[in-house]
Amino acid sequence: MIGAMLWTARRTSRAGIAEANDLGLETSEVEREILSSLTHSVRRGRCLRSRLPLPDGHPASMRPWRLLQRAGAKHPQLPSGWRVDGLPTPLPPVLRTAFVAVTEEWKERLFEAEGTATDVCAYWDGFHGAREARAVRDHLDRIVAALSEHAASRTA
């Protein structure tokens, strides 16, 4: 039984990777600190990393930030204990709206995001394959648009 579940998880993970790559995301399996859905504690684990490169000088380019799914986070800025590091607090409304959309859809599954001057990345479990890959792309697009809008409002 467990062997079949692992085989299915690997198969859907591969389908998720293939679909995410088809959607223009550079996707691979990585190991990182993630929130365990079983123990609700942070531990080292495997997940998918989908990277959306940003063109040089893109308005969403900024200093590094992270959206983390952490149970019991100190000073969570978002529902269900989600935390944002590296962005202004309180979060500007446009960023808060984009991040809350993530927290509402992914409260039961792994999804974290990071951004730098060159890319925005999502970390997710990939168990739901191609359908989930499309949702990841949609959220990354929404986050990039919110970051761009926030950057434009700061320079206006």
Image (tube, rainbow, N blue to C red):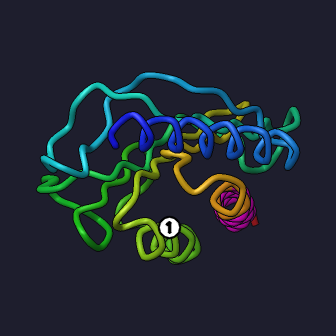
**Magenta: main secondary structure:** helix
Q: Secondary structure at mark 1?
A: helix
Looking at the rendering, in which quadrant would you find the C terminus?
bottom right
Give the residue displayed 33% in from the left and 39% down from the top: 2
Q: Position of residue 144 (x, y in %)?
A: 71, 56
Task: Using residue 72 as the reference point, say whether residue 154 is left or right of it.
Answer: right
Residue in the foreground of this view, choosing between 109 and 84: 109
Q: Position of residue 69 (x, y in %)?
A: 32, 53
- Kind of residue sitting beneath label 1: Val
Task: Using residue 16 as the reference point, say whether residue 122 is left or right of it.
Answer: left
Quadrant in the picture for residue 83: bottom left
- Vertical side of 123 occupied by 134: above or below: below
Q: Which residues are magenta?
A: 137-155
Q: Does the magenta run of residues contain 60? A: no
Q: Exactly how many numbered labels are in the figure? A: 1
Quadrant in the picture for residue 153: bottom right
Residue marked by disc 1: 102
Task: Using residue 120 as the reference point, say whether residue 10 is left or right of it.
Answer: left
Give the residue displayed 61% in from the left and 46% down from the top: 12
Looking at the rendering, in which quadrant would you find the N terminus?
top left
Q: Position of residue 70 (x, y in %)?
A: 24, 51
Give the residue displayed 83% in from the left and 44% down from the top: 58
Q: Position of residue 17 (x, y in %)?
A: 70, 38
Q: Does the magenta run of residues contain 138? A: yes
Give the residue displayed 88% in from the left and 44% down from the top: 22
